[in-house]
Image (cartoon, rainbow, N blue to C red):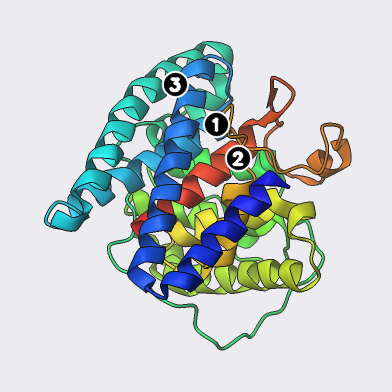
Amino acid sequence: MQKMLNFVFLLLICLVNLQPSSCQEDRRNAIISAMEKAVMFLAENHDNINIDALLGFIILEACLNTVVEVWENRAELTIERQRVMAVREKLLTFMEEAAQNIERQDPVSHKEFAPALKPGFWKVPQKWKKIKESRPYSLTSGNCLDLITSDFCISILLETKDDSDVCQIADNCTNLMINTHCDGYSLSHQLFYFLFARMKSCSNSLFQNAGYYENMLCDLMMQTNRNLEKKKLIHNFADLFTENIMFCGLAGFSDFFQTSWLDHILSWQKKDKGCFWMYTSSNDGGHMRRRTKRSEKIIEGVCSSHNTAVAVGALGGFLLY
């Protein structure tokens, strides 16, 4: 209740001031404050998070790196830029420590994703675009891509499987990644694959049409988020909702950076710990099982590794936008 009151108060301030720049400043500071708390969570738990959480923080670092560059000549953002620089410096240190721990605890996953766990791999959008309105596809109910297959396709692409060449595509991966009858986390797995290919500058024939597929997937993911919003189910599927924002934001679609959606994400942070918790209760095993992602890792009973990953990744996009 207190969290909701805080955001209502913030909204009232904006309405009273009637100055968009003031509202933007308030939200910008709210995002940076949330990031500062999240990085402190990483500092205290770098030896306890899983690879999903680390990927989220690495994507955040890529966003912060670009923010520092973009804000360099904006005198009015000097203080905010200094805060972002401080967050990024701490983040780089704790990310390295977390990566070393994951390599010891989960060497198989670390090897598969090793290139993507290094600063500099992820490149954030330099310009934004809108989802094209034409919608040849609509949402269906199909879990068409499992975690093991997704990881295999990505590891082949990243050249981390033995005897694989960079940007190699297995036949079954092509069919799976352009399947138009997927929903839920399967959609974000498909988009993730194309994002990895973009970061590796893959020029295979499949990726020459990457823009088309990214638009198609984010169109479906936007339909998912809007349906959840319309049916008032955002809090029931908050992890999926936020993951869609993070990945489609990373793909360059600004449609996902909606103010009300930002407020939802900020409200899910445990302010005293810095982590995020989006499940409806501490015993929401059903919600966790609905995820077709890597095994969730709960820390201290109230911190979700995956919730925190998608939240910080999405917030990085909001700040950059």
* Camera sees residue 1: yes
Residue bearing mark 3? 99
Is the C-beta separation of discs 1 and 2 under 8 Å? Answer: yes
**How far apart in space, not on screen, are marks 2 and 3 (Cα)?**
23 Å
Query: Could you say where residue 201 lies in the image, as x and y percent from the top left?
Result: 32, 54
Left or right of residue 243, residue 233 in this image = right
Q: Earlier in the sequence, mark 2 or mark 3?
A: 3
The residue at the point 41 percent across, 56 percent down is 26
Total marks in image? 3
**Quadrant location of the C terminus in the rendered image:** bottom left
- Distance from Cα at disc 1 to Cα at disc 2: 6 Å
Q: In the rendered structure, find residue 274 and report the number of the disc placed on it.
A: 1
- What's the residue type where badge 2 is placed? Gln
Q: Nearer the viewer, mark 1 or mark 3?
A: 1
Identify which residue is drawn at 30% across, 40% down.
Answer: 84
Above or below for 214 versus 83: below
Local packing at callout 2 (Cα closer than 10 Å; few below 14, some 14-19, many 20+) is many
Q: Earlier in the sequence, mark 1 or mark 3?
A: 3
